[in-house]
Amino acid sequence: MSDGATLDAAHGVHVLSFGCRLNLVEGEAMRRAALSAGHRDIAIVNTCGVTGEAVRQARQAIRRLKREAPTRDVVVTGCAAQMDVAAFAAMPEVDRVLGNGAKTAIESWRGAWTDDGAAIADVVHGRSPLEEGVEDHTRAFLGVQNGCDHSCTFCAIPLGRGPSRSAPLADVVASASRLAEQGFREIVLTGVDLTSYGSDLPDAPSLGRLVRAILKSVPDLQRLRLSSIDCIEADPILRAAFAEEERLMPYLHLSLQSGDDLILKRMKRRHSRADAVAVCADLRRLRPDMAFGADLIAGFPTETEAMA
């Protein structure tokens, strides 16, 4: 969970985001949209639907926010809200449920809201995923991709965010240039399935091409970093960029989920244990200071102690 604002202030647009970095980026975009639409006393809960615990924490936060400021509107959005609108709309503390597909559009925050307080947008035809978010005075997050085309058995994200959608390469480069001009020394590219970037665009630019384009076109940017990626989809241009571009930070967070081949198969992952090891070895060969982190799931159905 990440708190995107100071929630004890008397008035303002307060954002509480759970889950991934992309939610943080979208939380900042929603804050700007709500302010532009004239909201001055509102709390936005940007939920995560990856785990039951994340949903429980979001519901707990909603109740707390209303208890602390009974007159303040509480708007709930994010993946959990998209996947179970009825449950959140039924909470007496919730004034509005807003779908993932339109939550960052200023139009969603303007005008009169519907009587039932629910507006769930079609995530299949959601808006462009290009969003900017700020962590501090030196680092900015740039959301360039949204949704996922895969069907891993443990994941409900396609239900909450729809299919993979990419921001046009030129738009991303322009946004990165603008952030660098504003003084940000580091940009982190984020997405739900970042390595699928570009597959839906007319000329299918890869993530590697995007990285190269940003570094070439924004020479004042000191550091470019990637958020979590799927190791098996790291394209050759991206691997070469790690070897040749000092400004591309030598760290990757890998979406591995398991180190056992049978469990990976049952998860419907697209890589084996050997594939993951080979990718890491290749990147370490290309960039000796390369470091890695990873997501791993413990206790997947049928997993034994020996598999863990």
Image (cartoon, rainbow, N blue to C red):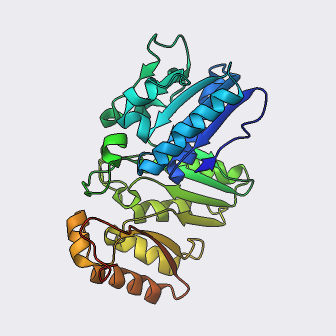
Q: Is residue 83 left or right of residue 4?
A: left
Seen from the viewer's position, the closer of residues 53 and 265 is: 53
How many marks can you see? 0
Residue 268 position, x and y percent, is 22, 63
Q: Which of the 4 image quadrants contains residue 9?
A: top right
Q: Residue at x 54, y 20 (%)?
A: 95
Task: Using the image as rendered, state which of residue 279 and residue 167 is in the foreground.
Answer: 279
Q: Position of residue 31 (x, y in %)?
A: 63, 33
Relative to 188, is 5 above or below?
A: above
Name the residue: 42% across, 51% down: 51
- The quadrant in which residue 240 appears is bottom left
Q: Is residue 254 above or below residue 19?
A: below
Left/right placement of residue 163 relative to residue 292 reads: left
Q: Is residue 191 left or right of residue 301?
A: right
Up/down of 17 relative to 92, above or below:
below
Work out which residue is located at the far right of the displayed protein and give it.
10
Q: Quadrant of the C terminus?
A: bottom left
Which residue is nearer to you in this view: 76 or 163?
76
- Residue beneath the point at 35% across and 48% down: 157
Tell me which residue sits at (33%, 84%) in the image: 278
Res 256 visible: yes
Q: Position of residue 196 (x, y in %)?
A: 34, 57
Q: Using residue 144 as the reference point, say whether residue 163 is left or right of it.
A: left
Could you say where residue 195 lies in the image, as x and y percent from the top left? 37, 61
Query: Can the viewer see residue 130 in this picture?
Result: no
